[in-house]
Image (cartoon, rainbow, N blue to C red):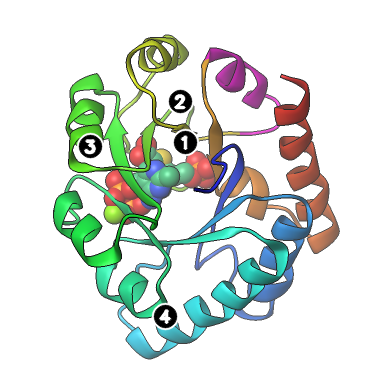
């Protein structure tokens, strides 16, 4: 089983448009991202399959785990992990299709009940959020760090914190119980690959010290 602790980078088709895509992702992985989620909402299956295939090779090179957002078929084709939101299908069916070794994560918003259901259904991690103002998903329901402390006491699964995460606010989330920090804009909003890698190293080092 994979050690699910550290930086969880999530791609964004706007931030990583055009030439930025591979250099920015490569920098995040070089900086120590342990999980990479391919999150693309476009309706272009050929481009999505091509990009996901490139990301799978890059993750294998860095020893990181690739997670596909929403799309069980694509995750199954590539034999990689999957993240499911509340509207993205049945986690139990995904577990049956992807097998016991696949990493399958569940969105739990601010609900310990959702997390309990996800654990029952076979989730590999439970994700709570949003903790701060999110540029990427401003309307996501809000959660508080004390929820992480409750979740750490109640569940044995790795706990993901997401939503407006930055190097500045990350330490309190880790101290409260987050095993993984899922980051979009706080990582990929950087103006250069060098800055992406610097931020990724900064997030990764927090998990060594806290
Ligand atoms: C690690 C992680 N946590 C939460 C989400 C949000 O998933 P969802 O609610 O399905 O929303 P979309 O990301 O699909 O817009 C996530 N993707 N990753
Ligand atoms: C994809 C996503 N899901 C969320 C949730 O609360 O479930 S918040 C979010 C956006 C995360 O992007 P950023 O790091 O730029 O805030
Ligand atoms: Mg989703």
The residue located at (45%, 25%) in the rendering is 131
Q: CA distance from mark 3 to mark 2?
A: 20 Å
Neighbours of disc 2 within 10 Å: few (<14), some (14-19), many (20+):
many
Residue 135 appears in the figure: no
User: What are the residue bounds of the magenta stretch?
Assistant: 166-176
Residue drawn at x 67%, y 74% is: 22
Residue at the spot of label 4: 48
Mark closer to the chain start, 3 or 2: 3
Q: Is residue 78 left or right of residue 60?
A: left
Residue 156, placed above or below residue 59: above
Give the residue at mark 3: 118
Most foreground residue, 57 or 25: 57
10 relative position to 18: left or right: left
Residue 93, image quadrant: bottom left
Q: CA distance from mark 2 to mark 4?
A: 29 Å
- Residue corresponding to mark 1: 162
């Amino acid at each position: 089983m994979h050690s699910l602790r550290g930086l969880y980078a999530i791609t964004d088709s706007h931030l990583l448009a055009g030439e930025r895509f591979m250099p920015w992702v490569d920098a995040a992985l070089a900086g120590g991202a342990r999980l990479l989620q391919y999150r693309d909402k476009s309706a272009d299956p050929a481009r999505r399959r091509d990009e996901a295939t490139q990301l799978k090779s890059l993750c294998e090179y860095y020893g990181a785990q690739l997670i596909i957002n929403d799309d069980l078929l694509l995750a199954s084709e590539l034999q990689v992990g999957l993240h499911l939101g509340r509207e993205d299908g049945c986690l139990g069916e995904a577990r049956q299709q992807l097998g016991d070794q696949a990493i399958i994560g569940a969105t739990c918003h601010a609900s310990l009940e959702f997390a309990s259901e996800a654990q029952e259904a076979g989730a590999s991690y439970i994700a709570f959020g949003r903790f701060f103002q999110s540029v990427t998903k401003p309307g996501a329901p809000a959660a508080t760090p004390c929820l992480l402390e409750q979740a750490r006491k109640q569940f044995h699964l790795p706990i993901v914190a997401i939503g407006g995460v930055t190097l500045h606010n990350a330490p309190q989330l880790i101290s409260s119980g987050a095993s993984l920090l899922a980051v979009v804009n706080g990582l990929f909003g950087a103006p250069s690959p060098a800055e992406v890698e610097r931020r990724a190293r900064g997030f990764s080092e927090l998990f060594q010290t806290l």
